[in-house]
Amino acid sequence: MANESFDITTGCDLQEVDNAVNQALREITGRFDFKNVLVEVEFSRADNKISIHTTDEYKLDAIWDALLGRLIARKVPTKNLKRGDMAQAGGNTVRQDVTLVQAIDSDTAKSISKFIRDQKFKKVTAQIQGDAVRVSGPSRDDLQTAMTALRAEDWGVELEFGNYR
């Protein structure tokens, strides 16, 4: 009998992030409280990072709120957004970087694998494969049970289940 399996991954749709950043910028620059105010929101696909640069902490939070609303509307998993510390930039301005988590790190992968072992599902095993975790077992029912248990836990990132076969 063939083994059933699925992969656990994480990530953000970079095109949706790009669209959300552009929409948020359009919304912010049209607002009255941002007239003649420095507003820079840049998305770097290569670094998986959004940089926010503005005049003060209040404006930074307002930009973040607008951006977060757009990201949520575009179904970008907010658990995968890691806000960095606010830093002083030149000329009395502040800057903040938001990192997009695009892969399961090795510590999280190990804890997912250990969690599946500790649950003692019938013949269900987990293997770490780079930035994904492959879970396999003899029956789809066992895998469904494993998925349900994994969804109930907080892993710090949004888990995606794919390659179900």
Image (cartoon, helix red, strand yellow):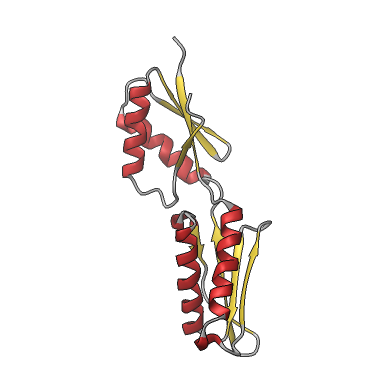
Percent across and percent down for residue 39 are 60, 80
Q: Residue at x 65, y 86 (%)?
A: 90
Total marks placed: 0
Residue 156 as seen in the image, left or right of residue 148: right
Percent across and percent down for residue 148 are 32, 36
Quadrant holding the N terminus: top left
Percent across and percent down for residue 141 are 33, 23
In the depicted view, which residue is nearer to us: 120 or 7? 7
Q: Residue at x 52, y 76 (%)?
A: 86
> Hey, which quadrant is residue 52 in on the image?
bottom right
Q: Can residue 96 be seen here?
A: no
- Above or below residue 22? Residue 143 is above
- Above or below residue 108? Residue 144 is above
Q: Can residue 130 be seen here?
A: yes
Which residue is situated farthest in the top direction here? 1
Q: Residue at x 46, y 25 (%)?
A: 5
Q: Residue at x 39, y 17 (%)?
A: 138
In the depicted view, which residue is nearer to us: 49 or 75? 75
> Hey, which quadrant is residue 34 in on the image?
bottom right
Which residue is situated farthest in the front direction here? 30
In the depicted view, which residue is nearer to us: 69 or 118? 69
